[in-house]
Image (cartoon, grey):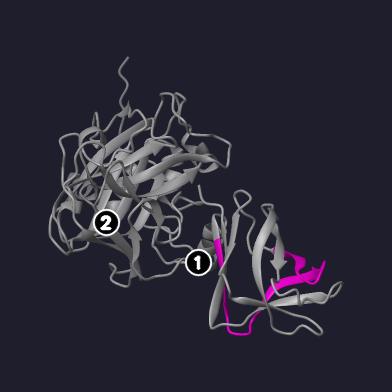
Amino acid sequence: MTVKVSKPAINVREELADLRKPTGIAGEAMLRAETPQEQFNLIGAGRRNLVINGDQRIWQRGVGPISANAGNTFCADRWQMGRYGSATGVFTGEQSTDAPDGFHNSVKLTVTTSDTPSGDEAYLITQPFEGLTIDPLAYETSSAKTITVSFWVKSSVVGTYAVSMQDGSAQRACTNSYTINSANTWEYKSVTIVGDTGSGNYEQGLTTKGGMIVFGLGGAGNRLASAMGTWYTSSGFTMSMPQSGGTNWIKTSGATFQITGVQLEVGKVATPFEHRSYGEELAACQRYFERMTFTSFQYTPIVCYNESTSNARGSLQYQVTKRAAPTFSATSNAFVATSTGATGTPVSLTSDSQTVTNARVLITNSNSTLVDGGASHIQMYISSGQISLDAEL
C-alpha cells in the first residue's frame, strides 16, 4: 500500500532569511543559558548582586584620601584596602566622581609610597562576605554554582591583573586574570569563576566571614596563584597575583587604579549592573558600620539618667540592626550634658554594653557637675563630632 503525505509549500529564501535574524546580546545570552535559574537571573527577576555598594556611592568614613598603611583599612563602605606581610608600600583610597556612563562614583586608589613586592607581600582591595551571603552559592557541595564577576576599571598602569574568589580564612582560592589594555581609560571586564566543590571555610548560615572577592594590586612569592581558573589550597595566604606574576601596580609611584560597578552574581554570563536605591544601599552598609555625625549644639538621640554628679547612663538606638554587637566609639571632648542646673557640662561617651540593636552609653563628667538623679540630654558643643558603630567582618 502506498501512503502519500503532502506538505504545504514553503519559500526557502524566506525561511533562510528568518534564520539570519539577529537575537541581540540578551537573546544570545538567553539561548546560551543552561538552566531555568540562569534565565531567571538574566531577565533580572529578584536580587542578583551579592556585592554591597558596588558603585561606591556610600562613604560614611569620609570621602577624602584614606591611607592603607597597615592591615585592612576601609575606604568606601564595605571595601577594604589591604596590605599584608612585610609590605612597606602605601596607597590611598578616596571617592571620585570620575566614573563611566551610568555611574556617579568610583573608588580611586593612588600609590603614595611605591614598593617592589617580594616574599609574602601583598596589596589588594577586597570586599568580605558573610557566610549567610555565600549560602546561595552552595559551595562545598556537588551543586556548587558558577559565578560571574563584572566591573569597570581604569588605571594608569596597563597589564595583567588578578581577581580571586576566596573563602573566609584564605584557605581556598580561585584566581582568574583580566587585562587593562589602555592607560587612563574606563574598560568593562567580566570574569567567570567555577563553583568550589572542595572543602573550605565558608561559614554557611553564619554571620561571620565566609568569603571575599579580591582585586590584586601587587604581590610576590607565596601571593602568586598556584593555578588559574580552578580552586586550590592557598595555605592561609590572600592571593593577589596571577600564577605567572602579572602587573605589580604598587611599584609605580603616583599610579592610580579606579573601580566601580562591581557585580558578583550566579551564572556564566554578566548581566547589567543592578542599581539599587541610595537608601537601600545605605541600610545594607549600616548593617556593618554606622556613623552618626552631629553639628554644633545638635542633640544626639541619647537621653540619660544621672546616677551621680559624675556619671550617667543612657540608651542609643541604631538606625539598622547590626551583623553583630558593634564596637562603640565617640569623638573625644566633643559632647556636653544639658540638664536643669548643669547646662553645657562637658562629658565623655563610652559604652559598657552593646547588642545588635542598641548600646548602653556611659556618660562621664570629670568635674562632677551633673545633677544627681536628674535627666540629661547629650549634645554637641564643637563644630562637629561623631559616634561610630563598627560591626565589620
Relative side of 132 to 271, left or right: right
Mark 1 or mark 2: which is in front?
2
- For marks 1 and 2 on the same chain, the one whose residue lies earlier in the sequence: 2
Q: Nearer the viewer, residue 256 or 70?
A: 70
Residue sitting at 24 percent across and 29 percent down?
A: 227
Q: Position of residue 231 (x, y in %)?
A: 33, 29
Determine the secondary structure under disc 2. Answer: strand
Relative to 107, say whether 372 is above or below: below
Disc 1 residue crowd, few under 14, some 14–19, many 20+, Cα 10 Å: few
**Amino acid of disc 1:** Ser
Q: Residue at x 16, y 64 (%)?
A: 184
Question: 312 left or right of 220?
Answer: right
Magenta segment range? 290-316
The residue where tag 2 is placed is 90
Q: Residue furthest right?
A: 373
The disc label shown at residue 277, or none: 1
Q: Amino acid at mark 2?
A: Val
| Residue at image point 34% right, 33% down | 173
Q: Nearer the viewer, residue 341 or 262?
A: 341
Q: CA distance from mark 1 to mark 2?
A: 34 Å
Q: Position of residue 122 (x, y in %)?
A: 27, 43
Residue 68 occupies quadrant: bottom left
